Amino acid sequence: MSTEGVIYRVAGPVVTATGITPKMYDVVQVGNEGLMGEVIKIVGDYSIIQVYEDTSGVRPGEPVTNTGLPLVAELGPGLLTSVYDGIQRPLPVLRDKMGDYIFRGVSAPGLDREKKWDFSPTVKNGEEVEAGQVIGTVMEGPMVHRIMVPPTFKKGKISNISAGKHTVEDVVAKVGGQEVTMMQKWPVRLSRPVMEKYQPDIPLVTGLRVLDTMFPLAKGGAAAIPGAFGTGKTVTQQSLAKYSNAEIVVYIGCGERGNEMTEVLTEFPELVDPTTGESLMNRTVLIANTSNMPVAAREASVYTGITIAEYFRDMGYDVSLMADSTSRWAEAMREISSRLEEMPGEEGYPAYLAGRLSEFYERACRAKALSGETGSISVIGAVSPPGGDLSEPVTQNTLRIVRVFWALDTKLRERRHFPTINWLTSYTMYDKQLGSWYKKNVAEDFPELKAWAMQVLQKESELQEIVQMVGSDSLPDEQKMTLEVARMIREIYLQQNAYHPVDSYCPISRQYVMMTLIKKYSDLAANALATGVQVDKIAYLPVRQRFNQAKYEENVDSELEAVSKDMETQFKGLGA
């Protein structure tokens, strides 16, 4: 197999080479500077390569070297707290080498080769182990990093296992004569194997009322957040990263603006993990690929992130992966496709757009790993449709794949209603699967309460059309009361302040109490109307204002109890 060749043609990030005989997706070094690239098409003697770096100044005739290996992610201790670019080069290490501007052709390993980790074996010499089995542990900050036999190894007896301090390249054990190090390498485009995939029937609890109650996502599921600029995609994803009951967070900034990525890089280390009280970065991996970086690396960043997430899933962790945004990833595919002169699909996107999106989202799952542990990857992909047009191809193809749709609404943003998730257009397909969990862990009537609230909001939407034509005074009292109850659901329950120390996270038990109180108000109001009490008297009861403020109080749970008693007293005062 020929490994040396020359450049025949250069078209932006796409380079055509001759003289090499690579396999598809082999990594190659291009030009005198050894720029990193990947073979994406082979036509006769010509190998077409997408280069992960800027190709300015690269000329035909310069050398091309085939490594014979696919693009791989380095997996092992040191991943947590790391900040990588799209091809897993550690950005802080590159900055220390050359300052704020990264030169072309410069590389650094994804994992620190010099740092020593304290390895504690969990198996003994002579024991028979299988591929994927845990053989030892390393403490990485607050997390236990489980060292596993690589999935490609055959069953064998363990030997030469050695406790103590080791680098990721040191041999810590042998399995049937094969050397095991703490670092694994895995092709990013290939899904890591599992023993069995489970039905997603446990919710990813986020602390956001509109999500947990109305549109829950299951652990191991996939969700899409499409929305126009300024509707709060990034803030919502940061809230999910901070408060969701996932143990590991992988955040992929895929083609986002530099200032947005800077916010993430500066804010994440400042965010306090509510479970440990330490920095959220201790259980986070960040992949930063801004819009001014080469498009080919943007395409690779999504695969790098999901491979890292699968590695932690194999240890038995629940992983939450944020991809912000898949639209920029699709735009990178479109640019490379046009350079390859492929037949364009809708709006110029490649015909295989839906297939690539499916490959990515279908790697989300809850599964029994080869290690015997149960872990999950929940994928939350932000979509940035041009002009907020949800009919464009990326959004539509994403919606065919994911089972949860959180639609961000520009009109809600204008009304200062946050999070701007539209309760009329959003949906979840996990309701039936999660219903039994909510009944068992929250309350038997929780699904019925949710269905009642959605019904009220739907009724409000219908009534608003009438109100706009003839005014609210023409409505009968029962419908006026429906509007008031819907307003309580919107303002007290669905609105949530992501920056408030108390309201930013709402436990699911408190969500149930709040919804029960709104239902109680609705029932008491219906009884009051039946006895002839005027709507205005019910609507302006002081308890409503107290209820609205209760969610911001430090002693919020005891305050909600007081609201319940106050509500009964005030309705009795109306003679209801």
Image (cartoon, rainbow, N blue to C red):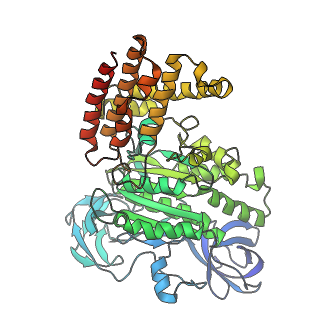
- Tell me what residue is drawn at x 72 percent, y 82 percent: 56
Please say whether residue 110 is visible from this viewpoint.
yes
Vertical comparison of 346 with 66: above or below: above
61 with respect to 162 (left or right): right
- Tell me what residue is drawn at x 54 percent, y 64 percent: 253
| Closer to us: 502 or 366 | 502
Residue 315, position as x, y percentages in the image: 34, 57
- Residue 448: name its quadrant: top left
Can you say which quadrant of the picture contains the C terminus?
top left
Residue 467, position as x, y percentages in the image: 62, 26
Vertical comparison of 270 with 32: above or below: above
Mark count:
0
- Tell me what residue is drawn at x 43 percent, y 53 percent: 498
- Residue 249: name its quadrant: bottom left
Can you say which quadrant of the picture contains the N terminus?
bottom right
Residue 486, position as x, y percentages in the image: 49, 30
| Closer to us: 259 or 555 | 555
- Residue 441: name its quadrant: top left
| Closer to us: 78 or 190 | 78
Residue 88, position as x, y percentages in the image: 50, 72
User: Which residue is situated farthest in the top direction here?
Assistant: 531
Vertical comparison of 182 with 104: above or below: above
550 with respect to 377 (left or right): left
| Closer to us: 441 or 175 | 441
Please say whether residue 80 is visible from this viewpoint.
no
